[in-house]
Image (cartoon, rainbow, N blue to C red):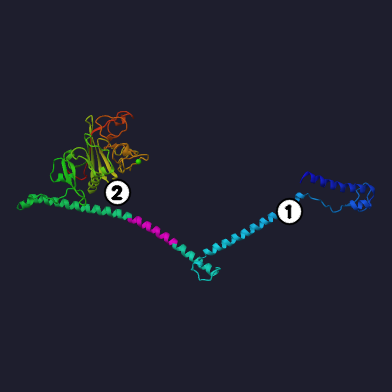
Amino acid sequence: MKPATWCWLSSAVLAAYGCLVAANNETEEIMDETAKSTCPVRLESRGRCEEGGECPYQVNLPPLTIQLPKQFSRIEEVFKEVQNLKETVNSLKKCCQDCKLQADDNREPGRNGLLSPGTEVPGEADGNRVRELESEVNKLSSDLRNTKEEIDVLQGHLEKLNLVNMNNIENYVDKKVANLTSVVNGLDGKCLSKCPGQEQIQSRPVQHLLYKDCSEYYTIGKRSSGTYSVTPDPQNSSFEVYCDMETMGGGWTVLQVRLDGSTNFTKTWQDYKVGFGNLRREFWLGNDKIHLLTKSDEMILRIDLEDFNGVKLYALYDPFYVANEFLRYRLHIGNYNGTAGDALRFSKHYNHDMKFFTTPDRDNDRYPSGNCGLYYSSGWWFDACLSANLNGKYYHQKYRGVRNGIFWGTWPGVSESQPGGYKSSFRKAKMMIRPKHFKP
Ligand SMILES: [Ca+2]
């Protein structure tokens, strides 16, 4: 309210009070004509005044009319606008409700022919039917979920069974073939000595005989080291290997040789799979062949090393097995024996046992931030990364920098080399296998 309005109101009240005071000054009853018309205020006594006490009087004021300024008319306009807005909101609300009802109707299954026609307003029966259908759908979907889980479990079983059975069957067939081969070899030996009447037949070279590995060539009397054809698995074709018939009784099938640096060992997964190099000099026999040789019989691994000081040491692992490519040629080594130290199982943190094969182009190692094969320039059963690596670079003398040469972590003096200092390498390295129960 503006100050002008307040002044106006105050003066009206003061005028009334002025009238009252004037009336009180004259007599108890003011009946003056002027006062009656302009200021009809009456003061009435409601009893006798007591001496020294209060007198009970009553003042009658006329009804007071206050003139409001014209700005108050805006309030009326605002009220009208609010009313209009309210109406608009109500109509929109109703429209919205209609839309919702329509949408609900469209969702009603009765409209899709599931219920009898003419049931525009769903009754109790329809409601029940809907609930029935709903519960049926729920049951079906839960059945479906259960079935899917069962299928998953069965699939898991099936995969396991497949793997187990395939391994069993493979082993069984391998053993049978091995027995037959040994029987045939035995008979062949007998015939050679006891059937003089069949010399013509005997003189023909025996083509059908299969030799699993070098130990079997040794058994039939072969004593010279060199290349021979072996068939460790009759279901796979034969291949050439180098046989060491001299070391520790002979009968060794050689898997790897380093002696002069003539073969580069920084190779791909495919190279390591099929093998590379020269069987009479430096080579890697090939992971597929190593797998076939080690699965056909229980094998032991012998590693021979020679450094540039002429120190020769060896390590034996019993047994030794390399899994197939599907299992990424995982390495399995048993007990260690020898003089070179157990570098393949150096410590808890550096252990090559049970590790997958890694090449510069195929990272299966346990080093999360890179490829050990790439860093150490070779294919090997890297951990994260190594305490041994017989496929490293061939250095003709000591070298500096990354330890990517041929390495055996338990070699005498190896721990004394300073980081960044010179690292010793090896003149010769050789890996070879022989059946565990072979007797030279
Ligand atoms: Ca890695």
Decide if residue 368 is on the left or right side of residue 430.
Answer: right
Q: Is 254 inside the magenta-drawn segment?
A: no
User: Residue 210 appears at what percent x and percent y?
Assistant: 16, 49
Confirm or reject: label 1 Cβ below 8 Å from ligand 1. Answer: no
Label 2 crowding class (10 Å Cα cut-off): few <14, some 14-19, many 20+?
few
Mark 2 — residue?
Answer: 326
Q: Residues within 10 Å of mark 1 (few under 14, many from 20)?
A: few
Tag 1: residue type? Answer: Glu
User: Which residue matches tag 1?
Assistant: 76
Is 219 on the left or on the right of 42, as rendered? left
- Could you tell me if residue 44 is visible in this image? no
Which of these two is toward me, 20 or 426? 20
Q: Is mark 2 within 8 Å of ligand 1?
A: no
Among the 4 quarters of the image, the one containing residue 306: top left
> Closer to the camera: disc 2 or disc 1?
1
Seen at 35% across and 56% down, the residue is 155
Measuring from the top left, give residue 382's x and y in whole percent.
31, 40
Q: CA distance from mark 2 to mark 1?
A: 90 Å
Residue 401 on image: x %, y %: 32, 31
Is 116 displayed left or right of 29 in the figure?
left
Q: Is residue 147 magenta?
A: yes
Look at the numbered disc 2 and give the secondary structure of its residue: helix
Answer with left or right where residue 78 lies relative to residue 227: right
Magenta span: helix, strand or loop, mainly? helix
The amino acid type found where label 2 is placed reads Phe
Question: Quick check: which quadrant has ligand 1?
Answer: top left
Eyeballing the image, is 344 above or below 181? above
Residue at far left of view:
197
Q: Report the magenta residues as a range.
A: 141-158
Q: Which mark is residue 225?
A: none
- Quarter of the view holding residue 359: top left
Quarter of the figure that contains the C terminus: top left
